[in-house]
Every structure is written in structure tokens, then in C-alpha cells.
Image (tube, rainbow, N blue to C red):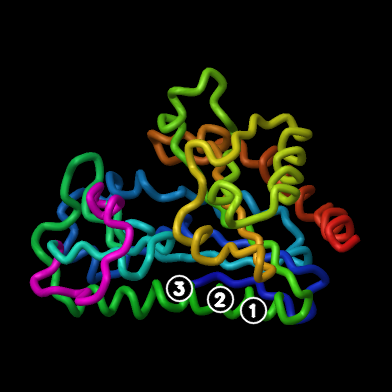
């Protein structure tokens, strides 16, 4: 359940992932769903992959997950499992991201808007099937592609694209259009995140760094500048391109143009970084 645009002869070490735009819900999920589908869909990064539609995919490798994040959250550790959701214990090892699990937002989301997603406890076979069919393939191809770019170029510039609800930005006097996260400087160089900030600002967008999102599991797990992997999470304010309440796309073209130009011109940064 992945859409892949992998170059056979990449001209640069640029990789884009879109882990939360998927809208596929397998039958096993639907059979256990307690809430109405349109309610759980509110936490999708609704059609955020379409932000990349005008891009020339010669300029980057792109991996887009098709399975919904309500089914399995690819931006969580595989061990971020709430065993209370299941009839028997799924994870007998160390549990990761306990704080996110307490919010009902582990690798298997449990709660949306204070309501339980599922009717009853789930069988362990459900967890294993979802992880093997939807979680593992995404992380396998992501890891493989990072390693291929590292082997070819000695570096990988990885951007993880998300969208953020505008109501999560209420405390800002001026709501950011873009939030760039590099795990507070641990997943990318300051030069790369500054380059991206200036790029978006030069296109008239308001940018925040690491606030309120510094990057999730993907950013923390893969970004390692000492090994040549620079990962930045890009969060786009949903109000820029959609009606959040109605789940309807409005005018995507301006945002698409910004991303098209960003990655058309990214070779300028790679040349600068190589000097």
C-alpha cells in the first residue's frame, strides 16, 4: 500500500516521504470500528500528498503511504503499542513513546476527540497483520532508499511531509503556514533548516522552527547528520489548502507551485553544501 516514485539514476540525494496522507481502511479495521468513518478521518493529513503534484519527480525520490494513519501510525515506533487495546499482550518487549500512548496515539491510535475508535478489544492477529502489511513495508523501503542515496552521494536530504490542524496553532499571534522540525537541531544541520526556512519565507509563508512540532518518530529515528542523513519534518497548515471541517480541498495551486520550485532549485543547496 505504497505509492513510490523511485529514480533509477538519481541526480541528487533528495528523498521525500508522506506517511499520513493515506485514506485506505482495510476490512479488518472497518469491522472493528465503533465511530463513523468521517469522524476518524479528521486526523488524516487529508490529501497532503497532492501538495507534490506539480513536482518533477526527477528532482527527488518520493514515498507515499496509502493506508490511513488511523489504522497504523507510521510516525510512531513499532513498539509504541498499548497492550490494553488487545485481548492478549502484543508487545512483550520494551514499550516506546509511553506519553503518546497515554494520549491514545500510539502506533495503533485508540482515541479520537475523547472517544474510543474501536468497539471491543482486538485480537493479537489484527496487530500483527497490520504491522506486517502496512507498517513494515513503509519503513523497509524508507531505510533502503536512505542507504542507497548514502552509498551513491555520501549524504541524504530527507523531508517528511505532514499537514497540521489550524486549531493546534491558536496560541500564535500569527499562525505559521509552515513548521519545520529537526528534533531541536539533532536530525539536521542548522544550515539545511535555515535554507528551507528562507525558501518558504521568500515565497510569502510564515515559518516556525520546532514549534509546536519538532518532528515525530520518523525524524528522530532516521535523522542522523553524523552519519550523513539530514531529516526535516515539514508541517503545512491545513487552512492553506482545504476546508478542515468539510474535508474539501480548496486552492492547492499556490502551495504546489512553492513545493515545485523548492525542489527544482534544491540543487543550489547541494552545490553549496558540497563546497
Q: Earlier in the sequence, mark 3 or mark 2?
A: 3
Residue drawn at x 26%, y 66% is 95
Indicate whether residue 156 is drawn in magenta. Answer: no
Between residue 46 and residue 105, name the one nearer to us: 105
The quadrant the C terminus occupies is bottom right
Instruction: Tell me the number on the disc at residue 147.
Output: 1
| Image coordinates for residue 115, horizontal then vertical, percent | 17, 44
| Circle 2 residue | 143
Between residue 257 and residue 233, name the one nearer to us: 233
Q: In the figure, is residue 189 to the left or right of 134?
A: right
Asked if marks 3 and 2 touch (Cβ < 8 Å), the reply is no
Asked if marks 2 and 1 touch (Cβ < 8 Å), the reply is yes
Distance between the Cα atoms at labels 2 and 1?
6 Å
1 up-or-down from 167: above or below: below
Provide the secondary structure element on which disc 2 rests: helix
Distance between the Cα atoms at labels 3 and 1?
21 Å
Q: Earlier in the sequence, mark 3 or mark 1?
A: 3
Residue drawn at x 60%, y 34% is 208
| Circle 3 residue | 1
Q: In the figure, is residue 15 to the left or right of 236?
A: right
The quadrant the N terminus occupies is bottom left
Q: Write down the region rendered in magenta.
A: 85-104
180 up-or-down from 140: above or below: above
Provide the secondary structure element on which disc 3 rests: loop
Residue drawn at x 63%, y 74% is 146
Q: Nearer the viewer, mark 3 or mark 2?
A: 2
| Image coordinates for residue 37, horizontal then vertical, percent | 27, 51
Q: Residues within 10 Å of mark 1 (few under 14, many from 20)?
A: some
Amino acid at each position: 500500500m505504497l505509492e513510490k516514485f523511485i529514480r533509477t539514476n538519481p541526480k541528487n540525494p533528495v528523498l521525500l516521504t508522506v506517511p499520513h496522507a493515506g485514506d485506505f481502511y482495510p476490512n479488518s479495521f472497518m469491522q472493528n470500528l465503533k465511530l463513523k468513518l468521517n469522524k476518524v478521518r479528521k486526523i488524516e493529513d487529508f490529501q497532503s500528498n497532492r501538495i507534490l503534484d506539480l513536482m518533477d519527480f526527477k528532482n527527488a525520490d518520493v514515498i507515499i503511504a496509502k493506508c490511513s494513519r488511523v489504522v497504523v501510525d507510521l510516525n510512531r515506533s513499532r513498539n509504541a503499542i498499548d497492550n490494553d487495546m488487545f485481548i492478549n499482550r502484543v508487545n512483550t518487549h520494551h514499550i516506546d513513546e509511553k506519553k503518546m500512548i497515554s494520549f491514545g496515539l500510539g502506533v495503533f491510535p485508540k482515541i479520537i476527540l475523547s472517544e474510543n475508535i474501536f468497539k471491543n478489544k482486538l485480537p493479537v492477529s489484527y496487530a500483527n497483520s497490520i504491522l506486517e502489511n502496512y507498517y513494515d513495508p513503509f519503513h523497509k523501503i524508507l531505510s533502503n532508499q536512505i542507504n542507497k542515496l548514502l552509498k551513491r552521494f555520501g549524504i541524504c536530504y530527507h523531508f517528511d511531509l505532514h499537514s497540521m490542524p489550524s486549531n493546534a496553532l491558536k496560541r500564535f499571534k500569527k499562525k505559521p503556514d509552515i513548521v519545520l522540525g529537526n528534533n531541536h537541531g539533532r536530525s539536521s544541520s542548522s544550515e539545511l533548516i535555515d535554507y528551507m526556512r528562507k525558501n518558504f519565507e521568500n515565497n510569502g509563508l510564515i515559518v516556525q522552527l520546532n514549534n509546536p512540532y519538532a518532528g515525530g518518530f520518523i525524524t528522530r529515528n532516521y535523522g542522523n547528520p553524523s552519519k550523513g542523513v539530514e531529516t526535516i519534518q515539514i508541517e503545512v497548515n491545513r487552512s492553506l489548502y482545504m476546508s478542515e471541517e468539510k474535508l474539501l480541498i480548496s486552492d492547492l495551486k499556490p502551495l504546489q507551485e512553492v513545493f515545485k520550485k523548492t525542489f527544482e532549485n534544491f540543487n543550489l543547496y547541494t552545490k553549496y553544501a558540497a563546497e
